[in-house]
Image (cartoon, helix red, strand yellow):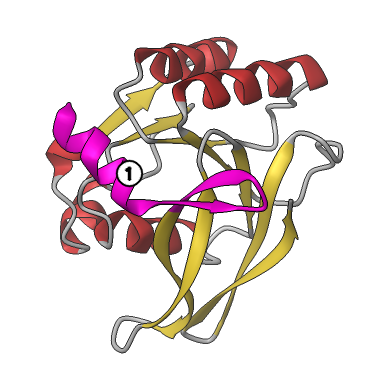
Amino acid sequence: MSELKEWSRERLSVLNGKEYLALRAQETFPLPEKLHSQLLALPKGALVEWSGAPGSGKTTALLSVLSQNPQLRAAWLEEEPEIYPAAFANHGIDLDRILFVESSLENLLWSGHAILKSGLFQILVLNLKSSLSLSEMDLRRLQLASEKSQATTVLLTETLRDFGNWAIRLQVQVSRKNEEVSLRVLKNR
C-alpha cells in the first residue's frame, strides 16, 4: 500500500486546484502499429464519459491507458460480458490488475458503488448499454463514491448522454476512420 501512496504522490498533478492522475492515452493512431500519444489527464475522483459507436475504439483507447500505466488497478463492470480478456494481455496488461464483473442491470450501479467503496481500484469502467438510464441521483451517488475513493469512474457509452453540466468532469468522443482512432475532448472542467 505504501508503494501505491508513493506512486500517487509522484504522478499527481494539480490543475486549477483539482487533482488529476497524469495518464498517457492515445489521441490518434493507426492500428496496430505506430502510436502517437498525447498526455490526457484523467481526473482523479471524478466521473468521465467516453462515448462512441460500437467499434469506434473506446476499449482500445482505454486499454492503451491501462497498458501505459502498469501500476493502476481497474475494475471492468458490464451487464453482459463483451470485453475479451485476452485483449488486455495482447496490450501487455497483467490480468491480475483487472477485475472483470458481470452484473445484472438491477445491480450494476450497486456493484459499482461496492467496488468504489473497497478502495482497491484506481479506475472503475462501467460499460453502459442504451437500456440503462441513469438518474441524477444515480450520477450523484457515483460522483460522491468516486470522490471519496479518489478513483476515476469511466462511463463507456455509445451515444453522448445529457448527464447535466455538473456530473461529468471530462467528456471524450471516440471515433474511428479507416484504421485511425481519435479522441476528441468535448468537456473538461
Question: Residue 4 colored magenta?
Answer: yes
- x then y, percent, for residue 35: 35, 83
Relative placement, left or right, of 130 versus 41 is right
- x then y, percent, for residue 96: 13, 36
**In the rendered image of this protein, does residue 170 appear above or below residue 6?**
below
Q: What's the residue at 27%, 37% (across, down)?
A: 73
Range of magenta residues: 1-21
Q: Amino acid at mark 1?
A: Arg
Relative placement, left or right, of 138 versus 151 is right
Q: Quadrant of residue 132?
A: top right
Relative placement, left or right, of 181 versus 157 is left
**In the rendered image of this protein, does residue 41 appear above or below residue 166?**
below
Q: What's the residue at 54%, 26% (across, down)?
A: 146
Relative placement, left or right, of 18 versus 113 is right
Name the quarter where the N terminus is drawn: top left
Q: Which residue is mark 1?
A: 9
How many marks overall? Answer: 1
Q: Quadrant of residue 32?
A: bottom left
- x then y, percent, for residue 87: 25, 56
Q: What's the residue at 28%, 87% (across, down)?
A: 33
